[in-house]
Image (cartoon, rainbow, N blue to C red):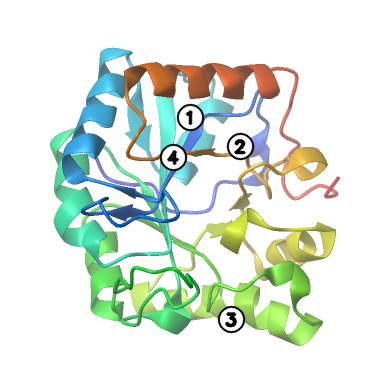
Amino acid sequence: MAADTSAPPAEALTLRRQPWILTYHSVSDPTDDPYGITVSADRLDEQLTWLRRRGLAGVGVTALLRAHAAGRRGLVGLTFDDGYADFLDEALPVLLGHGCTATVFVLPGRAGAGNSWDPLGPRKPLLTEDGIRAVAEAGMEIGSHGMLHRDLTALPDDALRAETHGSREELRRITGTAPAGFCYPYGTADRRVLQSVREAGYAYGCALVPGSLAGPLALPRTHVSHADRGGRLRAKELRHRLRHRNAAVRVFPGEVR
């Protein structure tokens, strides 16, 4: 399944309800995982099998938004934050085996480096620029996670612009295509950060629990851990539906509310 990574037009983002988007990070051995962000390849396979049995197919966020805007159901968004190098060898074969695509949010300012922002570790390598290109060539959507994985709400305006505008231009250089999506490090954003993302030209943004900021520039997502199997995934799906059952996503690029 080829990923549609072009930015959706404004009118394509009129959504009647919030689509369900899952958040992954590293796919590797979860034994040493103080932050609960690692799933094994076998568990990822089990989780995607559970989705498929429920009639759900995993896709990247741009494809998900386009489908929802057109009234198509039966899709769930798959996102992988931070751009860990293990995505190529561990996650990608599982995704392709299930006919799924995903959005991988990467850090061009740390390409080939590691996750030094996690004080408890463990240290894991991030995708190199060649790795980012390989992920894109495999049909996955590449999105920006900023340059350096910093709390954007704490940055002065010039540093914020480098994280939003600068990372988009760097990914354009690396892949040949400007990314449509932005993901907020730590899931943290405010109105100033959303405005910078909008001005940079992104069509959508991904948060975790955006609260009153929820909309096309702050889409809510569900964290997935190694502990999540059928029962827990079903509970998280129901929680998402209940939490956002009356939420409507405003048309981008209207006023951020």
Distance, label 4 to label 3, CA atoms, is: 24 Å
Residue 99 in view of the camera: no
Q: Amino acid at mark 1?
A: Ala
Residue shown at 43%/64% (left/top)?
Answer: 82
Mark 1 element type: helix
Mark 4 element type: helix
Discs 4, 3 touching: Cβ within 8 Å = no
Pick the residue in front: 204 or 52: 52
Q: Amino acid at mark 3?
A: Gly
Q: Which part of the image, by quadrant, shows the C terminus?
A: top right
Discs 2, 3 touching: Cβ within 8 Å = no
Q: Is residue 78 found left or right of 42 in the rendered image?
A: right
Distance, label 1 to label 4, CA atoms, is: 6 Å
Residue shown at 20%/34% (left/top)?
Answer: 45
Discs 2, 4 touching: Cβ within 8 Å = no
Disc 1 target residue: 67
Comes first in the chain, label 3 or label 1:
1
Q: Residues within 10 Å of mark 2 (few under 14, many from 20)?
A: some
Pick the residue in front: 247 or 168: 247
Distance, label 3 to label 1, CA atoms, is: 29 Å
Disc 3 target residue: 166
Disc 2 target residue: 12
Mark 3 element type: helix
Comes first in the chain, label 2 or label 3:
2
Choose top left, top right, bottom left or bottom right for residue 120.
Answer: bottom left
